Image: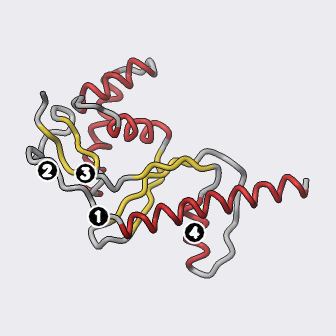
Amino acid sequence: PLRRQRQMCIRDRRELATYELVRFELIAEDADPPPADLDPDANLLAGRPVVSSLVRLMVTAYPVDRIAASLESGHTPSIGAVGMHHLALHRDRQGAPFALDLSPGSAQLLLALIEADGRTGYETVHHLASVFDHPLDDLLRFAGEQLDQWREQGLLLGARPPD
């Protein structure tokens, strides 16, 4: 049992170090310029959503964002059981890095948008619905709300016209 706890601590430290490195990179990195045909107010399902070049996805076994926040506030973090934690890291409008806890479905949607290769938001959601055998109408409702929220948070810059 003690050996297992120690291994968790070592892994936790590695994940925390990776998380802190990503936060540092977000502070130091310049965003790529947006495409010339970007419309910040475009319909994100009808157009081709543009994900900020500063978005980083992480899947961790520990809630490293909460551990880091506890350490920064001078508290001893409580490290719960190992699980899957999906995070999107980005910068706010003042340039400070932040992390969003994502559901596995939201993480998959954001990853699909990053890898969309010219697909519209609708085409991306349709693809996910077929891959996961999920009703398209339900997924479109969820995705539409999520995309608008991500635009407000700066993860999405807007959309480009469909090809």
Residues at discs 2 and 3 in contact (Cβ within 8 Å): yes
**SS at badge 2:** loop
Structural crowding at the residue carrying mark 1, measured as other residues with C-alpha within 10 Å and reported as few (<14), some (14–19) or many (≥20): few
Q: Say which residue appears at 24% left-offset and 29% top-offset.
A: 119
Q: Say which residue appears at 70% left-offset and 49% top-offset.
A: 82
Q: CA distance from mark 4 to mark 2?
A: 33 Å
Q: Which badge, 2 or 3, comes first in the chain's sequence?
A: 2
**Coordinates of residue 33 in the picture (x, y in percent):** 19, 55
| Nearer to me, 80 or 61 | 61
Callout 2 amino acid: Pro
Q: Which residue is mark 3?
A: 151
Q: CA distance from mark 4 to mark 1?
A: 24 Å
Structural crowding at the residue carrying mark 3, measured as other residues with C-alpha within 10 Å and reported as few (<14), some (14–19) or many (≥20): many
Question: Which label sits in the foreground, 2 or 1?
Answer: 1
Q: CA distance from mark 3 to mark 1?
A: 19 Å
Q: Which badge, 2 or 1, comes first in the chain's sequence?
A: 1
Q: Say which residue appears at 53% left-offset and 66% top-offset.
A: 20
When the figure is inspected, residue 111 is found, relative to residue 89, above or below; the finding is above
Q: CA distance from mark 3 to mark 4?
A: 26 Å
Q: Which residue is mark 4?
A: 68
Which label sits on residue 30? 1
